[in-house]
């Protein structure tokens, strides 16, 4: 049964993730209430923010129980490994594209994993990546992806989603 959350719970989660250390510190102090902490952790899980929450919580280990810290650390490491796999897939595709003189641009969230390669942005939960290809290279890119073993997961849409 999902926990009931309120805007104050969402606000607390946001403050826990704040870049402002004073705001974050105050927010983690509020997590001393076991029920509130349970709701905020559940909300973080629902929003796919557990890896980011772990990085924020590392400075406040006493605000979470040992089982909570272990669970968050495991989620963080699993996310780091998944992001490393995504990074490796992008590098493989880019390397193959280069041999065929096809230019690619990495878009949106996938760019983060190249800004901190050692940690591959373990705080960011990614499930896929987007690349931009010149329309003249679309067929060549499709062939390249097939060569690498990729298959379409759904029917492609045309220009503007049609």
Image (cartoon, rainbow, N blue to C red):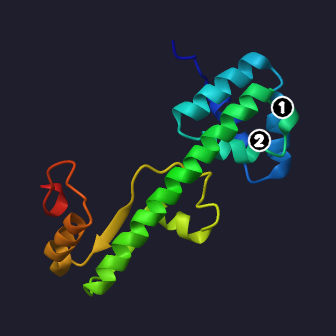
In the shown orientation, is residue 85 left or right of residue 121?
left
The correct choice, above or below, for 158 with respect to 65 in the image is below
Name the N-terminal-most of marks 2 and 1: 2
Residue shown at the point (82%, 29%) measured from the top left? 30
Quadrant of the image containing the C terminus: bottom left
The correct choice, above or below, for 38 with respect to 82 in the image is above
Tell me the SS state at disc 1.
helix
- To which quarter of the image does residue 42 belong? top right
Residue 123 percent across, percent down from the top left: 62, 51
- To which quarter of the image does residue 113 belong? bottom right
The answer to whether the residues at label 2 and label 1 have Cβ atoms under 8 Å apart is yes
Crowd around label 2: few <14 · some 14–19 · many ≥20 (10 Å): many
Residue 4 percent across, percent down from the top left: 57, 17
In the shown orientation, is residue 105 left or right of residue 22?
left
- In the rendering, which numbered label is found on residue 57? 2
Crowd around label 1: few <14 · some 14–19 · many ≥20 (10 Å): many
Tell me the SS state at disc 2.
helix
Residue shown at the point (40%, 67%) measured from the top left? 90
Residue 5 percent across, percent down from the top left: 59, 22
**Residue at image mark 1:** 63
Residue shown at the point (18%, 60%) measured from the top left? 160
In the shown orientation, is residue 48 left or right of residue 18?
left
Residue 137 in view = yes
Residue shown at the point (53%, 48%) measured from the top left? 125
The correct choice, above or below, for 21 with respect to 41 in the image is below
The correct choice, above or below, for 86 with respect to 144 in the image is above
Residue 83 percent across, percent down from the top left: 51, 55
């Amino acid at each position: 049964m999902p926990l009931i959350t309120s805007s104050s719970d969402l606000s607390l989660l946001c403050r826990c993730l704040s870049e402002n250390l004073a705001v974050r510190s105050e927010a983690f102090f509020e997590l001393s209430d076991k029920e509130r902490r349970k709701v905020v952790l559940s909300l973080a899980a629902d929003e796919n923010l557990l890896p980011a929450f772990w990085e924020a919580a590392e400075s406040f280990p006493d605000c979470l129980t040992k089982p909570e810290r272990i669970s968050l650390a495991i989620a963080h490491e699993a996310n780091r490994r998944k992001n490393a796999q995504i990074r490796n897939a992008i590098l493989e595709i880019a390397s193959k594209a280069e041999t065929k003189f096809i230019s690619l641009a990495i878009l949106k969230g996938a760019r983060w994993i190249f800004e901190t390669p050692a940690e591959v942005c373990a705080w960011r939960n990614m499930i896929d990546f987007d690349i931009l290809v010149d329309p003249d290279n679309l067929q060549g890119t499709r062939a390249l992806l097939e060569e690498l073993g990729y298959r379409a997961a759904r029917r492609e849409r045309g220009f503007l989603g049609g």
